[in-house]
Amino acid sequence: MRPISSFQVPTPEELTALRAVPKHRRDQALIEVLAGCGLRVSEVCALQVAHLHWTGEAPFLRIVGKGGQERRVPLNLQTQDALRAWLEARPRFQRFLVFCNLRTGKQLTRKAVWAALRRHSRQAGLRSLSPHLLRHSFGAGLAQRQVPLAQISALMGHASMLSAQRYLAAGTSLPAAVAQLDQRSSLARWWSCLRNRSYRFFGESLPTPAGTTSQTVGRQTELQQLQAHADQRVDTLLLGPAGVGKSHLLAQLSGERLIRLVRLSPPKQALLEIAEALHSRGVFQPTTGASSLPTAGEPVPPSAAESVQGPQGESATGRSAGRAPQEDFEVFKKQHHRTSIQGWLRLVLDAVEKDQWVLVIDDLSGLSPYLGRLLDQLGGKFRIIAALREVKRGYTSHFSRFERLSLANLSRRETQQLLRQHLAGLAVEDRTLLETHLWEHSGGNPRALLEMIERLRREPGVSCEAVRQLHHPGAHRQIDLTPIILIPAVLLVAARFIARGLGDTEAYILAGIGAALVMGAQFFLFRMRR
């Protein structure tokens, strides 16, 4: 390998003179990338926006050199300043390449880079400096700062370490050596550090879509159908996996006679919420005098409802003068804290007319036989719109009169639309990578998608590294392990009985040990699923 003499490598004074020549921001950035990163001229011409990783405290270039070999080259502060000035003035018609022809926007050619350097060298009164000589100045500067040959070779993309021997060398910190290539004053480097610390550059920003960011995506048909059922007083069951958007649709329902519940358990609390909602609408007017409700175990007298509500929705004894409705109900609730669930249920049912009110229950996933009977009793007077993941076997009779609406995950097009709504205006390094990654790791599940978007919005910009680190296991379909545990357990219990009947003690003991292991596995799997 032919060594490079000190006469061939540009001196710091020559580089300073070359930088001082007035020139376009593109040419200034070209010189800094060649001299401050050691890139080949072909690598500079092919440098793409996606190769810029300007995040965190250590920005770098990701270069794919000869033979497809990839390397990362740190950016010192001087190179950051020049690149930043050019990126902010770069023509909008060129979206992918960092350096381009100023008139046509096409990729810069090797001949154009050589011509620009020759022109600026002549203006500075220097010998004709080529792109490769600027690359050599980068390697020689690292060698003067005692960077090992192996690191210089890797940083410059040499196929063999022998290529780096031309620079002479021997050992210090690579980032520190690259930073020392900046020959400006300490004050200039300090000011550059402050400016570039919080700077983020990305190729493009997601456009702001037409309409508001809170509009429903991919659920317009279901929302219209659900609203029609609420207006027509039709019992409706909204089905779908966790995070698919059932709660969001229920929250969009509107109407004067809607009463919203988060869940139906505990049942007494749910009945108190219904009674309070009716009281706030002027329908349920409790008395504040003597007890009019039965305690636990007592039947409800026929006069109880009459003493609570009169013909016009007014209390038989009248509301206490000067007392706010909320305070009035709280006093009444304290007086009847021992009232049974059935007592509150009877009072609520007697206070309303049939099919005049709609209960919107956000979550029925904890349905039990008792809550199923309570749901049937409420369905005698109220129309019910509720959300549920799936109707389990044994509870289908409670939903025989319900219309069913099923929700699926969003399609890829709808996922992209939701992304653009919630990431509108945020800088994105690689839009294609962002949309593909979030689609693959969310499966179109809106909750998983929004939770990952929320994590991205905490960053100054959406970098490729931040996108690749995003994962959401809750978006994947959960596997029901019940058959896997139940079948071996049943077989082992049967084996124990057979072994006992045959008098085979060893088989009986082995079957017992197997059953114990299966029970232990079932316990730990249950804990993990929780």
Image (tube, rainbow, N blue to C red):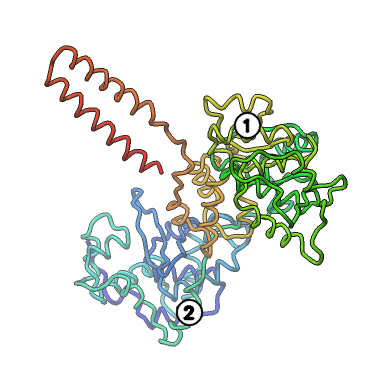
> In the rendered view, would you say 49 is above or below 481?
below
Residue 180 placement, left or right of 267: left
Residue occupying image coordinates x 79% and y 62%: 320
Q: Which amino acid is tagged 2?
A: Leu
Q: Which amino acid is tagged 1?
A: Ser
Percent position of residue 136, x then y:
33, 68
- Per the image, label 2 sits on a secondary structure element best described as helix
Residue identified by numbered label 1: 406
Residue occupying image coordinates x 69% and y 28%: 403
Percent position of residue 248, x then y:
65, 46
**Quadrant placement of the N terminus:** bottom left
**Quadrant placement of the C terminus:** top left
Nearest the eye: 431 or 233 = 233
Alpha carbon distance from label 2 to label 1: 54 Å
Residue 202 placement, left or right of 167: right
Residue identified by numbered label 2: 194
Comparing labels 2 and 1, the label whose residue is closer to the camera: 1
Residue 415 appears in the rendering: no
Percent position of residue 398, x then y:
62, 28
Percent position of residue 475, x then y:
49, 42
Q: Quadrant of residue 31?
A: bottom left
Give the number of callouts: 2
